[in-house]
Image (cartoon, rainbow, N blue to C red):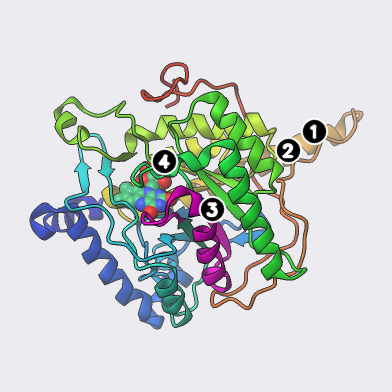
Amino acid sequence: MLYQRLARPVLFRIGKGDAETAHETTVRWLARLSGRSWLRDGLIRYGRPAAPVTVCGLRFPNPVGLAAGMDKDGLAVGAWPALGFGFAEIGTVTGVPQPGNPKPRLYRMPASQGLVNRMGFNNDGAEALAARLASAPPVDCPLGISIGKSKSVPLEGAVEDYLHSLRTLYPFADYFAVNVSSPNTPGLRRLQDTESLRALLTALRDEGERIAAGRRPHPVLVKIAPDLTEPAMAQLLEVCLDTGVAGVIATNTTLGRDGVAPSEDAVAAQPGGMSGGPLGPIAREIVRFVRRETGGKLPVIGSGGVMTPDDAEAMFDAGADLVQIYTGLVYNGPSVVRRSVRRYRRKATGRRRARHSAAHDAARKPSPGPAPERKLPCPPPRTSAHAPTTRSRRAAPCASASTRTAPSCSIGASTTTWPGPSASP
Ligand SMILES: Cc1cc2nc3c(=O)[nH]c(=O)nc-3n(C[C@H](O)[C@H](O)[C@H](O)COP(=O)(O)O)c2cc1C
């Protein structure tokens, strides 16, 4: 509430209301916090709620992370855990530095709790990010690095461009997110086509294994668009399973405009990807679809429309192992992170208690045999190859605390062939 009443009105007035100026100013302030070790470490120690989970062989202090795009150049890496996050994904970074699309390119839709952006991967490039991370303070949470294709590189050169970023940033990442789903780089989403994706993911896997030299390579996750048809998404997931991808991030921003308040139709008409409240139901349906289609074999990071603890809970219930937040932070401030973690913890405790009392009841009755154990898939255990700037948090083979259902789904997005809008909350 304090954020909505006091901080947000000030932030939204910065730069005469220009959303990108406010964003840059905020990241600059957070970069200062990132560099003040006593304050940063105090906030982490006393302010970050703990709810440890292990996913993809990585141990996360809690399952709520920062989504890609907020800190594209890794300027404030130390600040994110101080705001309560259990992990942070920086980037998307490209092999070549680039300015992105012409401004203005970021728009708020407060009545809809959404944003429209067409940033176009504005970033300083992989080498500048590596140099920054080499001298950054230790990051007290797993650090994901999102890599994407440089605009100046044609699609045929995409594999080498991604490989360049992977090699350059390998020592600093705990996992890599492969961004083939931004709507703002021309042609990028074609990399989600079966053969292009297979070639890209195979090359990244082989290079990761080469760098890891017999130890466990960093997990590679694929971030998917919410605007794919159902068959296209099923094919994409098959390629992910075939190529040993560690997990999926569902989803990126949507080209659809379902759920926008009529008063904001003019802003919604801006070209670009939409995030926030209206994306939530679509992203959750896709998380359900991924779980059902892969039989739970691929861990899922749910990204899209987590604006409140209720939304986080709905995303976990849909089957996400971890969730990420971007737009929710803009509208509701960092308290949404801490409150979402607490909600997750309460639910996990409730589930553990229910299991405990069920086991207790069962022990008093003649046993019908042991209940099947539910485990999250993860890559085979190997030891870490790198000596990262980030503190190593690799863990033994993973097992998630959460249980989840994967009901049948119908995915709703106006620009897709998915059947009808979702009935999710
Ligand atoms: C301004 C802005 C920039 C973004 N940049 C990136 C990016 O560089 N890479 C990426 O993978 N996702 C990017 N995203 C998408 C977010 O990571 C996230 O997947 C999406 O916004 C849905 O989550 P949300 O509803 O919590 O915002 C961006 C989103 C916004 C609003």
CA distance separating discs 4 and 1: 39 Å
In terms of depth relative to the viewer, which is nearer, 6 or 222? 222
Say what secondary structure mark 3 lies in. Answer: loop
Label 2–label 1 contact, CB within 8 A? yes
Q: Is disc 1's CB within 8 Å of ligand 1? A: no
Q: Residues within 10 Å of mark 4 (few under 14, many from 20)?
A: many
Mark 3: which amino acid?
Pro
Residue 255: horizontal and vertical position, in percent? Answer: 34, 33
Could you tell me which residue is drawn at 35 percent across and 55 percent down?
A: 121
Checking the image for residue 304, the label placed there is 4
Q: Earlier in the sequence, mark 4 or mark 1?
A: 4
Q: Which mark is residue 207?
A: none
- Of residue 9 and residue 246, the one placed in the foreground of this image is 246
Kindly report the distance in space between the C-alpha atoms of the residues bearing marks 2 and 3: 26 Å
Q: CA distance from mark 3 to mark 1?
A: 31 Å
The amino acid at mark 2 is Ser
Q: Is residue 418 above or below residue 192?
A: above
Alpha carbon separation for disc pair 2 and 1: 6 Å
Q: Position of residue 325 (x, y in %)?
A: 41, 49
Q: Which residue is mark 3?
A: 63
**364 displayed left or right of 129:** right
Q: Is residue 172 above or below residue 226?
A: below
Say which residue label 1 marks: 361
Which stretch is magenta? 148-177
Nearer the observer, disc 3 or disc 1? 3
Residue at left offset 17%, top offset 50%: 104
Can residue 54 be seen from the camera position used here?
Answer: no
The disc, 2 or 4, on the residue closer to the chain's N-terminal end is 4
For the C terminus, give its image quadrant. top left
Secondary structure at numbered mark 1: helix
Q: Which mark is residue 357?
A: 2
